Amino acid sequence: MSGHSELTTGPLEYRSHEGRMTILGFWMFLGAEIALFATLFGTFAVLFGRTADAPTPQELFELPMVLIMTFLLLTSSFTCGIAIHEMRRGSLKGLLTWLSITLVLGLGFLGFEIYEFVHYAHEGASMPSSAFWSSFFVLTGTHGLHVTLGICWAVLLMIQLKQRGLTQVTSRKTFVLGLYWHFLDVIWIFIFTSVYLIGMVV
């Protein structure tokens, strides 16, 4: 039997050889992304506490805001999972509905993050302020940029889904988007604990 044969059972996104290889390749891409964020986390750890004359994280970090951001992003991971479930049920309407909810939650997260950055800058904590704040903005800003790219990707995918429906190609793209979105949520958990929680108490 040819290794490039198509499957007739299992999730739609895995039935073609191209789909399976694309998903495998995306897992490898996420490995590179892990290396990127590991480098940013390592840099932040080295520069932690070096605030110079700028405000300290204890002075600026606000737990309620961070909890709201965390709630929005983690809830979006849950709704994204439901969207993938709806896709595997063959429900295009359900998929688009839950993807839309995921996008709204992601936009809410970005809105709070932008507000946070502006507030910190107004209080005297910006990238030029100190080594600590420089590493903070690079780390959290890189994550925020990834979230922004994920939202743009999802919008374009939803347009394609409305035009073409659920096919092996669109289902593969949707599944890969889901992997990407869950990855961003995992990275945020590390940011929440190692940046915000530790920054508030140390």
Image (cartoon, helix red, strand yellow):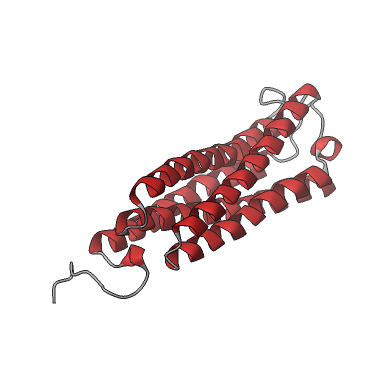
53 is higher (above) or lower (below) than 157: above
Number of numbered discs visible in the structure rendering: 0
Can the viewer see residue 202 in this picture?
A: no
In the picture as drawn, the residue positioned furthest to the left comes out as: 1
Q: Residue at x 43, y 50 (%)?
A: 32
Left or right of 123? Residue 146 is left
Q: Residue at x 42, y 65 (%)?
A: 90
Residue 91 drawn at (x, y percent): 45, 62
Does 1 sit above or below residue 185? Answer: below
Q: Nearer the viewer, residue 31 or 80?
A: 80
Does residue 199 appear in the picture of this structure?
A: yes
Q: Quadrant of residue 142?
A: top right
The residue shown at (67%, 38%) is 47
The answer to whether residue 41 is left or right of residue 24 is right
Of residues 45 and 19, the one drawn nearer to the viewer in this rendering = 19
Image coords of residue 88 (percent x, y): 43, 66
Up-down relation of residue 103 to residue 9 (above or below): above
The residue closer to the viewer here, 130 or 30, is 30
- Horizontal side, residue 12 vs residue 68: left or right: left
The image shows residue 189 at horizontal and vertical percentages of: 65, 54
**Front-lying residue, 59 or 100:** 100
Quarter of the image that includes the N terminus: bottom left
> Percent position (x, y) of residue 95?
49, 57
